[in-house]
Image: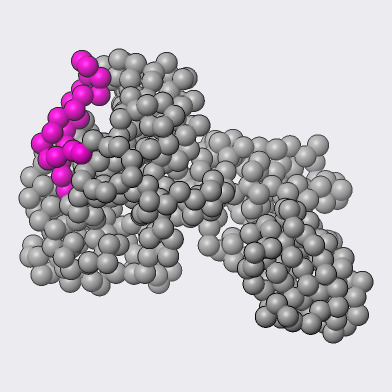
Amino acid sequence: MSEMNFDQVLDCKGMNCPLPVIKTKKAIDAMDSGQVLKMVATDPGSKNDISAWASRTGNELLNSEQTDEGYVFFIQKK
Amino acid sequence: MLTPYSANELFNWLRQKDDFLLLDVRNEEDFGRFQVESPHKVDMLNVPYFDFMEEEETSVAKVPRNKKIKVVCAKEGSAQYVGEILESHGFEDVGYLKEGIVSWGNMLAPVRVNEEGEAFEVWQFIRPGKASLSWGVISEGELSIFDPSRNLEFYTEFAAEHGCKITQTFETHLQADYISGSRFISKAVGSKVYGHSGDFMGASFDYTAVQNGDIFKASPNGPDIEVVHSPGHTPGSTCYKIDDTFVVSGDTIFLVSLGRPDLGGKAVEWAGMLYETMTQKIKTMDPTLQILPGHYIEWAEADEDLVFMDTLQNILDSNAAIYGISTEADFVEFIKQNIRKQPDVYAEIRKVNAGWLDPEDDEQSSMDLGKNECAASAYAAQQSA
């Protein structure tokens, strides 16, 4: 799934909560509807947080996976 | 000023029934899976930190203004974040839990069990985040610990405060629900580790195998520690009788149940062993013995000093539904009726406790988080709740 299309990358590796979600929110706010953000984080807490944040805000979490570089999320702006 | 607080401070406030709001800002799923459990009723609210990010005004409006606010999150960053938002809205008394919910999960609270002035001291170490109990005996400057958890710092500080040294630790069984501290303590202070070969055979660390009827000493002239092999929860499950007065019962006897025998995947076989233990070992013990269990299910089991202890007689009388079963077939049937899934992580924790796995510290902390699932009954009530 890593070859998913995306429009922008956000690197949150090494950051602890709440930063990955704050930065994701800022990035998504600045994007256009339908665009996809690839976000990479290393904080294990971001897994459930990003998923809960996405369902709360209506942005769609297209995919999330654990890879060698960390937790990778693909989020589509609503 | 946003003030940090420790898990121990939080426990003391809960214990004293202080008036405050516990504001947990983790996502709902994590909150639902594991949260602070208090000896007394606590005012608790879950509003995820990203709600404050998305809808600041609405989220702040959910927080009562007439109370002290204690914020909890996974690590501590999000609690600080929310705390700052609350302060910017005029909240004056806001604190955040240092190192997050994990520190609550690891926290141990010591309670003296026997009276001051006795020849030896019996201590209970409550781990509220796990609903588990370890026990200590201090005699002639020597501390024996039963079923220590992996909070090495706590036990060494406790020993230093009480002017004693940790000389030995006793395992009642190979734990599946939390990571044992025995080998970490042993490595740090050179204490001996005791356990039954029925569980510990093949362990990667040195331990002294105990056998039914063995008698050890808490200190050279201290009370006896007598081994009572009590298989069922696991084949190597063992109770330790102290001074013919107390029984550290591990996951064999709980105040309101027995330890479930199905965790090893051989429910019928181990239930048979447990039935034999119940009829031949437990019910033949002196009924006035004080039972010191390895877990509790509810805070309501504790007395007003928060000690989880009762006489064997009271336990047998008040749990007749399980202790009163009079045939092995009925007992096995009861166990089968009460079987429920065990957390996936238990298989991994067993390997860590046998020394076959040695994950990183962070990984161990995360494996070790969450309430235990060790009792054979009192489950149906939780299911329907």
What x and y, as percent, mark residue B66? 74, 47
Please give left or right for residue B29 compared with residue B304 in the image: right
Tell how many labels: 0
Please give left or right for residue A70 compared with residue B379 in the image: right
Q: Is residue B328 visible?
A: yes
Where residue A48 sits, quadrant-wise, is bottom right
* Residue ID at (61%, 54%): B44
Q: Quadrant of the C terminus of chain B?
A: bottom left
Q: Is residue B331 magenta?
A: no
Please give left or right for residue B303 compared with residue B220 in the image: right
Q: Residue furthest bottom?
A: A34
User: Is B3 or A76 nearer to us in this picture?
Assistant: A76
What x and y, as percent, mark residue B330? 12, 69
User: Is A54 or B376 nearer to us in this picture?
Assistant: A54
What x and y, as percent, mark residue B191? 34, 28
* Residue ID at (47%, 34%): B152
Please give left or right for residue B116 compared with residue A54 in the image: left
User: Is A24 or A1 nearer to us in this picture?
Assistant: A1
What x and y, as percent, mark residue B49? 74, 59
* Residue ID at (86%, 73%): A8
Q: Quadrant of the N terminus of chain B?
A: top right
* Residue ID at (33%, 24%): B167
Where residue B28 sits, quadrant-wise, is bottom right
Q: Is residue B41 visible?
A: no
Q: Is residue B221 magenta?
A: yes
- Magenta stretch? B209-230
Position of residue B166 relative to residue B44, above or below, is above
Figure coloring: one colour
